[in-house]
Each structure stands twice: as C-alpha cells, then as structure tokens.
Amino acid sequence: MTAEVVRTTRPSAKQQVGELYAKYGQRKPMGVSAPSPWLPHYFLHRTFLGDQDLLIIYNTKRCKYRCHFCQLPAKSSPTLIPGSEIVSQFSYVVKELKHSLSVLDRVTFSNEGSVLDAATFPTEAMLEIAEGINELRRVRTLVLETRLEFVDTDVLAQIREAAPRVSLNILTGFETHDPYIRDKVLFKREPLDVFERGLDRVAEAGAQLTAYVLFKPRWDMTDEEAVAEAEASIDYLAEQTKARGLDLSVRLNPMYAADGSRWAKKAHTSADYQPPRLTDVMRVAEKKRGEGVNIYIGMSTEGLDDGSNYMGREDYSMKLVRPVLLFNGGKINSFDGYI
Ligand code: SF4
C-alpha cells in the first residue's frame, strides 16, 4: 500500500479526535432516550467541583409525577425495567470507563426521576451496584438523585453497608420555597411539610443534601422578583438544613422552557415572559457564597429546552461561561471584573 493510499483511506488524527471529542466529551449530547434496556440514557466521566465524577443517568421506568416544568418522564420507559437490566447498565458503563476507574472520587446516580423510588429502581439492584461502587477505592461520595419522599433510612443504611467507604449525598429538586409556585405553577405535589419531613430522614441517615433551586420559576416574574425569590428559597434551605445539622450544597438553575411542557406552553402565551438573566443568577450565587452557602450555578438545559433560556437575554455572551466555570470550581468567589 502506498503512502498516498494510506492518506486517503484513514482519518487524520485531528479529524478523529475532533469527532470523538464532540461525541463523547463535555458536549456529549444529553436528552435522548437509551435505545435498549441494557444501556443507560447517559453517562459521563467529568470534573465536577474539583472531583472526578462519574454521572450515570439510568434507563428505568418513568417517574410517576408530571411536574408542569419537566419533560423527563416523556423520554423514559412506561414499563418496569428489571433490576438485572439496570445492573447491566452499570456494568456497561464501568466497562466503557475501565481505564479511568482508579481516578474516580465520586459517583452520581440519576434516572430522570428518583433512584430511591423502588417502584422504578428496585432496591436489590441499587444494593448490588453499591457493592460494585465499593470496589472503586478512591470513591468517597455517592450522590443519589431523588424526591425526598423516597428517602428511607433503612435503605440508606443498607446502601452504606454495601459501600461503607462512601458518604451519601441526597440530590433533590427543591425548586422554590413559595407554596403557591410549588403547587400551582410547577405542580410539584410536594408540600413544604413533606419536604421538611424528608430533610429529617436525610439528617437521621447521616447523609448530606444537594438541592436544586430554580431561578425565576414563574414566567410572569420580573427580573427583580426573580432575584428576591431565589434568595428567599436559598435562605429557607440554609435555615432548614442548619437546624438539622445537615451539610447543604445548592445548585442554582436558571429556568428554561422544557420543550412541550405545560409550563413552556403557558409561558409562551404570556406577554410578560422573559427567561432569566444569567448575570442575575451569577450575582445571587456570589452573594450567597459570601454568606457562607456552598453554591454553584447549573448552566445545562439537559438537551430538553425549546430554545427559550438564559442565552436569549440581552446580558448573555459566551464571555460569561468561563467565570461561571471558575466560580463553580471554587477558583473565584466574585464576578467583579467579569460582569
Ligand atoms: S421534576 Fe422530578 S418529580 Fe417532577 S416530573 Fe420531573 S423527574 Fe418527576
């Protein structure tokens, strides 16, 4: 074979790496459904707040809730995916990542719903996977995304027993402190007293809490109202967790219109609707970190938005991305000089 032929038949290193990076790097597409019950919806080895984190979004039966701002159940299976197949999804991921297993510090489990809901993610499967996690010698944190009603202290104790090296972090969508917005706008069906009883169980289990707060959860809010509302939600979380001796992290998420959601349909018929300004989100995060809250900013729309998000506002530019990443990584605590 001549050198000429070799040049024309194989891709260049630049082309090959560029394609692999686009397909499997930080821009790996999110939001599509897994093509088979033996495959997860998504996984990514990523740097996350200084940790080497493995995120797995399992492919399980869909979440039974229908929150008006969320389209995640629409991409998930209407029928139960057996625990053995969920364990196979985990096996697939660890085989794909075999060369980087020894550097992982933390593992994050999601299933586009609640991984502690045994009706969608059988407990036996979770315990088998937790035993596997225990073999990852550097992993110190296992993050479990769930509504708090599914936090069962006995199950968390069993997970701890299966993976004694890791501490558990419960990741949950709090969204807002405002009962009207929770119930009538977001249709969360999780009253504050139910959330607070869940916090009691998280504390009793000795786990930590990470909570999502939605920035501008009403489409008819002004930018000023959105700032005040986000601050009040974060303050509520800080007080409630402090009272229980719970470690709190907050992910402040600028609201986006999830494609096809009821929230999006109503927002688009409202003359007052404007997505949030990222610079407002940044200023609230900066202020709350200054007050001692462990907070970071979620910029992903998980591939589910209909194009209506913070990037459409007049304050947005690509120049804001780097300072947010620096802030999230703890490299800066103030956006002065950037906005
Ligand atoms: S926000 Fe959570 S609980 Fe509500 S529908 Fe989406 S996945 Fe289910």
Image (cartoon, rainbow, N blue to C red):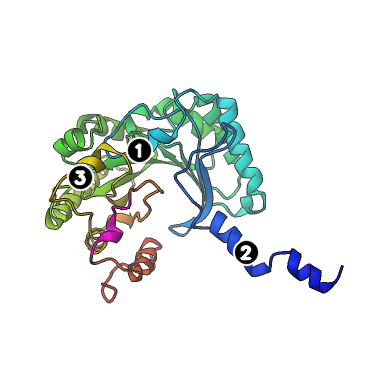
In the rendered image, the vertical position of residue 160 relative to residue 30, given as above or below = above
Viewer-nearest residue: 56 or 288: 56
Q: Quadrant of the C terminus?
A: bottom left
SS majority, magenta: loop
Distance Cα–Cα, label 2 vs label 3: 41 Å
Q: Quadrant of the N terminus?
A: bottom right
Tag count in the figure? 3
Magenta residue check for 311: yes
Q: Position of residue 152 (x, y in %)?
A: 39, 27
Q: Answer with the quarter of the image where residue 267 lies.
A: top left
In the rendered image, the vertical position of residue 241 relative to residue 5, given as above or below = above
Per the image, the residue denoted by label 3 is 267
Q: Position of residue 171 (x, y in %)?
A: 38, 41
Q: Is residue 182 left or right of residue 133?
A: left
In the rendered image, the vertical position of residue 91 relative to residue 104, given as above or below = above
Residue at coordinates 50% horizontally, 28% vertically from top-left? 158
Label 2 sits on a secondary structure element that is: helix
Residue at coordinates 51% horizontally, 55% vertically from top-left? 46
Q: Which of pointers 2 and 3 indicates the residue nearer the eye?
A: 3
Label 3 sits on a secondary structure element that is: helix
Q: Answer with the quarter of the image where residue 24 lies.
A: bottom right
Q: Counting other residues with Cα less than 10 Å from the Cα at mark 2, is it few (<14), some (14-19), or many (20 or more)?
A: few
Look at the image and tell me whether residue 64 can be seen: yes
Magenta residue check for 237: no
The circle on residue 17 is: 2
Viewer-nearest residue: 145 or 300: 300
Per the image, the residue denoted by label 1 is 71
In the rendered image, the vertical position of residue 82 relative to residue 209, given as above or below = above
